[in-house]
Amino acid sequence: MNEDYNDINMINYKQYKTNNKEQSYIHVQDGEGTLISPDNLMQYKGQFKNGKKHGKGELIQILDALGNHKAIIKGNWKNGFLSGKALIFLTNQLNQFIPNQTQPIQLKYQDSFEGLFKKGQASGYGILKFSNGDSYQGSFKKCLKDGNGKYVSVIEQNNQYRVQGEFVENHIEGSCVIQYLNGHTYQGTVFCNSISGLGQLQFKNGINYEGNFHSNKFEGRGTLNIPMPLKLIKSTLSPLSTSPMNNSFQPSMTINTQNNGVQIFYYSGEFKQGLFHGKGKAIWPQNENQKYLLQYEGFFQNSKIDGGKGTFYFGPNLIHGFFKENKLAGQAYKRQNIDDKLQVIYKGELTVDTQLMDGFGELIWVNLKHKNQYIGEIHNDKIQGQGQLSFQDQYGGMAQYFGGMRDNLFYGKGELTFSNGDRYVGNFQNGHFEGSGSLTFMNDQMVYQGFFLNGCFHGRSTLKVQNQFIINGLFLNGQIDCNSNVLINFTNGDSYSGRVDHNYHFNGMGVYRNLAESYKLIGTFKEGVPHSYCKKVFHQIGNPLKIIRILYGFYNQAKINGNAIESIIDSDTGKVVAKNNQMFINGKLQKGNGQFRETFDENSLLNDLFYDSVERQCDFENIN
């Protein structure tokens, strides 16, 4: 409010009452007359009673030495004081020189008041008009604006307004309505000409504030709505133009947009000196292309998101934490809804500048059926470093991982246990078993220990089948190499060295050693059993170096068939002491000496060079 024209001493007409000095100049005691002051600056013409102005009259008061500034009063007097209705003009005549003009131009300014007086003071209803265009119309008390009234100010071209409300001792105070000629409107309380207390301020451009004021500024709790283009919101409220949101978050809440494309910025909370300060809530558009709302609830300082904990909402997504100068500082809680079936939650540290997950934290993936969880180190929004991960595996349960991570994948040393009980301990690369490691699977019935590549058995390793055997051999891409020799040690003490198929059945050249019956079988195998020409060497029990018997025969699907030759050996000298021809049918020895068939190939049957070659090739030392 402009206070230059609020002073209405011009209507404090106590200064115009008759004094003792004036009495000597009164020409009449009663009736019509004229009163002139000794300095000729005041003249009254009107009615008198008992030597005092009483009744109708007109008073002219010269207010400066040149006589250009004067007051003219027309009204009623009572016992020397204005009383009742009166009309006052306050004139000021100035001479203003204009270039290229020989005579000055006389400019005349006039203030006026018309209203009721009591004992020389304006009291009651009155109209006050100033030469600059300002005016007041309403109640007066002791020459001061007091009570309900309307004040219009037009002196400042950019600050013209109209006030309708309560006045106290010349000040606007209490409930009022202020209408600015530029279209703004205020409705609420005013104290000492200053907007203070509860009120509503509506701007012509649609900006609206409703709440507490103090000294013409937003102060305390209030609500601010700003309809404007997004660019203008960001430039006007620059602290909110850079919010701690991750572009990967895709909010789904739509905003109300007017026909002209104007969008809304909304703030509700505490203000200080016209700025957001304290606890509050702000809502504004995310960007110009997507009609989504961002919402922040928390603390502000000097219109910045600062000074305490707060929460950012991006539709169904949110970030919660401690904010300092529009950025998260320290621990934070971050939730993202990927779709209606998957939600991602993060609890941990974020980078100050980029607001990326960084440091030690917890990640949770929640869908309709299960919850995956990671606790450990994270760097630049990726799982990096040491941590533990719980996730749903291919068996429908929850797998547990402890170890190193890189780029969200298992990396380095780690331990992975599946829900079905399978367990891997060893090295990882790019999320796969790779390098040396150990895998226990099939309900702890099988243990693979050795090397992996892309998650598969690969390299010379061992595979243990509980209560059955341990196989040592070369694995390629998850399967045993059928073109190289393996060594199989059985739990009963038997062993096999040679070739096998993908099901670990003896297949090809090999040597089988039987501990209980103290023999070794050398030859060719198929689908796990001897097949074709074989040599069966029996040893002295407890002394495998002493040979006591050799049986040469032809095997068909594990059973010896046809002619066979048995050699009895002297275990001390190693010489053949007897040689017998035998006949077998389906593994059973026939009575009597065997009769060789015409098609019998004795050279193939007794080919010790072949059998020695097989034994050398299948020897375990040669395998390694």
Image (spheres, rainbow, N blue to C red):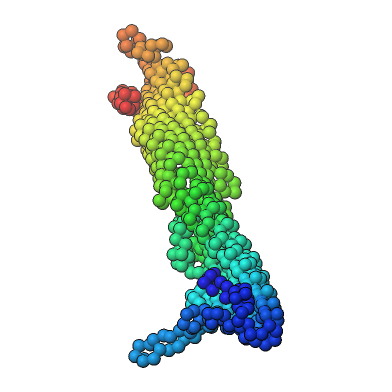
Asked where in the image residue 519 lies, by quadrant, the reply is top left
The residue lying at 49 percent from left, 83 percent from top is 67
| Percent x, y of residue 240 | 47, 59
| Percent x, y of residue 443 | 53, 31
* Above/below status of 333 relative to 130: above
The residue lying at 45 percent from left, 28 percent from top is 464
Pick out the residue farthest to the top.
572
Quadrant containing the C terminus is: top left
| Percent x, y of residue 154 | 53, 78
Front residue of this view, candidates 431 and 585: 431
Front residue of this view, candidates 269 and 442: 269
| Percent x, y of residue 335 | 53, 50
* Above/below status of 157 relative to 281: below
Relative to 606, 69 lies left or right? right
The residue lying at 42 percent from left, 16 percent from top is 518
* Above/below status of 451 relative to 489: below
Pick out the residue farthest to the bottom.
102
Asked where in the image residue 433 lies, by quadrant, the reply is top left
The residue lying at 42 percent from left, 48 percent from top is 352
Asked where in the image residue 151 lies, by quadrant, the reply is bottom right
Quadrant containing the N terminus is: bottom right
The answer, for residue 157, to whether it is visible in the render is yes
Relative to 308, 142 lies left or right? right
Number of callouts in the render?
Answer: 0
The answer, for residue 58, to whether it is visible in the render is no
Pick out the residue farthest to the front.
24
Front residue of this view, candidates 420 and 326: 326
